[in-house]
Image (cartoon, coloured by chain):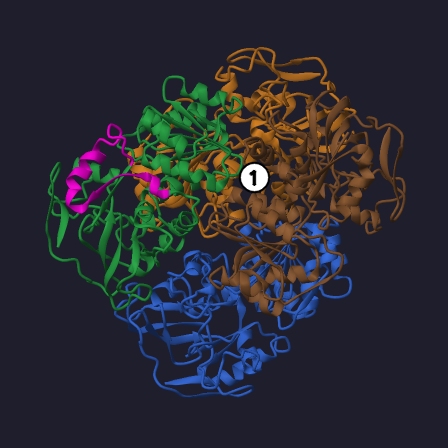
Chain colours: A brown, B blue, C green, D orange
Amino acid sequence: MKALVYHGPGSKAWEDVPDAAVQEATDVVVRVDTTTICGTDLHILLGDVAAVTDGRVLGHEAVGTVTEVGDAVKGFSVGDRVLVPAITKCGRCEYCQRGMPSHCQTVGGIGWIFGHLIDGTQAEYVRVPYADTSLYAVPDNVTNEQAIFLADSLPTGYEVGVLAGEVRPGHTVAVVGAGAVGLSAILTTGLWGASKVIAVDTNKFRLTKALDFGATDAIEAGPNTAEDVLAMTDGLGVDVSIEAVGYPETLRTAASLVRPGGTIANIGVHGVPVELPMQEMWIHNVKLTMGLVDTVSIPTLLKMVGSGRIPAEKMGTHTFGVGEIDEAYDVFKNAAANEALKVVINA
Amino acid sequence: MKALVYHGPGSKAWEDVPDAAVQEATDVVVRVDTTTICGTDLHILLGDVAAVTDGRVLGHEAVGTVTEVGDAVKGFSVGDRVLVPAITKCGRCEYCQRGMPSHCQTVGGIGWIFGHLIDGTQAEYVRVPYADTSLYAVPDNVTNEQAIFLADSLPTGYEVGVLAGEVRPGHTVAVVGAGAVGLSAILTTGLWGASKVIAVDTNKFRLTKALDFGATDAIEAGPNTAEDVLAMTDGLGVDVSIEAVGYPETLRTAASLVRPGGTIANIGVHGVPVELPMQEMWIHNVKLTMGLVDTVSIPTLLKMVGSGRIPAEKMGTHTFGVGEIDEAYDVFKNAAANEALKVVINA
Amino acid sequence: MKALVYHGPGSKAWEDVPDAAVQEATDVVVRVDTTTICGTDLHILLGDVAAVTDGRVLGHEAVGTVTEVGDAVKGFSVGDRVLVPAITKCGRCEYCQRGMPSHCQTVGGIGWIFGHLIDGTQAEYVRVPYADTSLYAVPDNVTNEQAIFLADSLPTGYEVGVLAGEVRPGHTVAVVGAGAVGLSAILTTGLWGASKVIAVDTNKFRLTKALDFGATDAIEAGPNTAEDVLAMTDGLGVDVSIEAVGYPETLRTAASLVRPGGTIANIGVHGVPVELPMQEMWIHNVKLTMGLVDTVSIPTLLKMVGSGRIPAEKMGTHTFGVGEIDEAYDVFKNAAANEALKVVINA
Amino acid sequence: MKALVYHGPGSKAWEDVPDAAVQEATDVVVRVDTTTICGTDLHILLGDVAAVTDGRVLGHEAVGTVTEVGDAVKGFSVGDRVLVPAITKCGRCEYCQRGMPSHCQTVGGIGWIFGHLIDGTQAEYVRVPYADTSLYAVPDNVTNEQAIFLADSLPTGYEVGVLAGEVRPGHTVAVVGAGAVGLSAILTTGLWGASKVIAVDTNKFRLTKALDFGATDAIEAGPNTAEDVLAMTDGLGVDVSIEAVGYPETLRTAASLVRPGGTIANIGVHGVPVELPMQEMWIHNVKLTMGLVDTVSIPTLLKMVGSGRIPAEKMGTHTFGVGEIDEAYDVFKNAAANEALKVVINA
């Protein structure tokens, strides 16, 4: 079969690899019908993720069709249309049992293994371990072009932003960074009744998208961001401030927007230490949350997408055939310039 | 009347001041029978708290007797034995209504006003604003020498450490810093069923006290602290890591002890920014909490002290008459050297 | 001044009474600009509420203007436009401090005192005790005709139905009884992301309104109700089943619709005991909740009404001048026949 | 192998049956080293549980040793010492994923299948389906005579009583019925910091045991029970009232003891409908909870037993060899008369 293989920093190729096959009784093989690219894939190509080595098939998001089933698998059959999420769950370790498979102790100490510790989804087929506890059936009222964003980006914005941030009815929310993940948070704040959602970004295209995705206000980031947001929130700041970029200064900006008693929900992937003004923050009764997605919200999100309340398909701005995967990477690499959010890659 | 008056950095005097008196219909005056000294009072004397100006009566903790009652006060009468907590609550602002009077918007934007924005409790008498919503009656089965620690230190350890940290049955807990506030956290972890409580400090006296206050393990802080604690907790770390010192390195130590999915509860008062290793922490699904005490746990703590489950009196290691308040400050200033936790000052 | 006075079962009169006046330092007097009638007022007129005696001014809902202010009141001034909620809160008893003023121990063991234990709001003026902790300022972006329903019916549906029932994103909800309170629950399920809301009633007008208020499905109540609802919910039933009628059979219907692990939220006011099939229910891991409204959700609801997300004005189907209050009662008494939900009575 | 086989109402025999063996790749076989008898087993013998048919091996509690392992099992090996809990979990259905395997949709719509829908644990060996997600390793610091009570009775009292009842620090708790399950609730209220625990029973032996297990007060049940309990709780009643009997009158007693805002946690297995005074209860803002145990608290309870905080072994009052299982049933059938709580049956 064909797959996109990593060959060290800056190097990847769509090439022949051995066919994906069931190895354990709890595996299935899925034919990849739709996949996408994640910001993490770009980091891998920069050589930032040491655990990814030469020869690894990339990608951790897919919608597809089951083609082979291990003997111990009970919940899925050949022909089932399924969502392959970014996180694999054994279902029995302490972390899986408490709903936190992001730290599944069985599959690798971390639940993200596709395109990282095992071969991934940017391929014609993918082997899925612990299929019974990891895969989700896709209902008829959800398309591939919607479901694909439930593999990672939408649950990330929702779980690490909205859920960890504890958005509640009547709350004001700021989202610093309106890329794919920030927009995913914006798209799902309504599930918890936010009354005001303020998007903050430097890019006008993204701010326009933010308003389309449900933000009530859009602010161009700058030296007066904190002042502007406080002026919109009784002078005290927002209840929940979501960081969706991953730099020291954006996290400090997010921290500067939150009112006493509020939550700063960090979604951004950080590469360096961050200095926080604890001498001011300690007295404010705030919380700073952070983490990798668990993808356990997928059943809820599938219901909300299926019932029309979450227009997930809006995340996909560009569509490619799998033969054009290099072009898809090029567009996504310069997402802001290309007015791209997420790309859809169909088989 | 006599009171301990602040006269600028390094200077204080037990001297004559105008009598405390009811000024608003919602005030009462309390005769101070027992008071104590807080680490914050030491910071004030160093000149670290700009809002405290020359002439201010110090202190924010007292047990006493009501001597005068404003016209609108319904819940207290002359002669009542009461606890004056560190936090004053109007009872009607958004923060008071949600149980977070630490940020009461009415009394000053912050609920801590005694010995800070108004005259305090290290005096013969003290005026208490918003008495109905701020004071607590002391039941007969709780002594002054127990109740005095419920004014600030015990609720601080409990609320900002144990409650914010979300200690739950079966949890492992680390407490970095076994001074009065860290020990208060240790003393109250049992209310939520912690199974293992590890005290970390550099001082042997405090580590001995920690074991006496309910810690199951005591570790001398050093370069191997994280390694030692991880070895005691399946290699993953504790569920809740409580910081009770207030320095960058102790907060980083606390952060290094927590397992994925756990909470770092910062109680320490910080004076400088803190650099956190967000490049490692972001993926660990941890929370960092912080804040000023609300003192809303006082009714619960009074019940637990009264029923004998919380031996609050153990916090008081040294007792003084109010005439010896200078000596009390001297002992408390060098708490570790004097094997002191908290001092009791009786009228 | 004029007021609607109760004179025993079946008898009421709009007549002269002594002027409302400040009696305690914590009181204010409010000129009633808008009021309404509650189902409870009808029960009182039937003689069902023993505590209401001859001479009592009726009504417990009002929007008005402050005309007199007690000496201890800090938060309100003459001229302020305010919402007088059904519940009065002292702000300092155990129940008020935990956000459950429905059982305020100070004002009467129960927080509902207007038109019950003290004179009420169906009058030109009303005395409001504990004004600082009980009244709410009405923002400019909320009209009297919206705010009046936040005094009781909307918070009742929201707090006793949606909040007590713990509606969460993706949930299915059934509401048995689509009168004013059932519709209030329906109107607010969206704040918590319900994915399917099934209204059950015998009246077609109400079912039509239910769809207009946000229900996704409307079912005519009958012998197959449980079968119908289960067919719509994977055969297991709804996550949250809200009872908004108050009869044994409607509560049993609500109980029959809930899936294992779900909640039955009883809003109905019951007059007789209810036999529940505990021999079937015990094993289903369900909860049955019930209670009087606290009205503590009013700040949240004001924000959601002001931002346009909750069209509260839709509850008012008929408008009267205060001189037509008898006619208003007649219309409301036969609400279903008159296609009435709530009446608005303006001064 | 030998096993205790049900042969219709009133009839059981310790007799030869086919050997337990792995049937599915996810099964293991466990040699039963220790088992016990549950009240439910007595109900089955009375013919009350229609799903249990002639030929079924009884019992749903065991501690034992793994002797055979299916191909897909990863977490357990031959020789492992394990706890076989009353509930079997597939680990992947909606209910298992939300921590409510009591209603596992895969194993039978209900998680209790041993000695009910499949052969049970009162046998020399037992086949355990879904072993990876259902079994628990028993740590070295927990004996068989302690662990056996974590299979059902202790988690039932804890989860269905203490957890569902939401006991919190400072709470007052009443437990109506001090048999094995009521005592299990009493034994675990301390994990959540209850300040007063009142046992109510008609049997003096059980009341004595209740005090030994951690109750602060013991009351002989009678016509004045409610009056007595209210007198001990400020006249308002307890925060949490736990029912551990299963009759209409004991549930009504439990309901009469709870204060406004409290919880009635029903643990009892009911056989007939129960009439509740909803005309009084509706206004009290109380919750009534009920359900089958999930056994998901076993990891927490193992830690607390291992650390010495929960003396689980106290539940076992009588010990038998497996050859004496008939005698064990006779003793347990007349538990009160024999001053028995639970029996321990060792291989």
Is residue A127 visible to us here?
A: yes
The amino acid type, in three-letter code, at marker 1 is Lys
Rendered view: D5 above or below A30: above
Q: Position of residue D253 (x, y in %)?
A: 35, 35
Asked which quadrant contains residue B213, the reply is bottom right
Q: Is residue B248 left or right of residue A172?
A: right
Magenta residues span: C312-341
**Residue at 41% from the left image edge and 43% from the top image edge:** C310
**Residue at 40% from the left image edge and 65% from the top image edge:** B89
Q: Label 1 lies in what chain? A: D
Who is closer to the viewer here, A167 or D218? A167
**Residue at 86% from the left image edge and 31% from the top image edge:** A2
| Number of residues whose C-alpha sits closer than 10 Å to that of mark 1, classed few (under 14), some (14–19) or many (20 or more) | some
Outermost residue, left side: C16
Q: Is residue D343 left or right of residue A89?
A: left
Look at mark 1 in the image and give the residue it sits on: D314
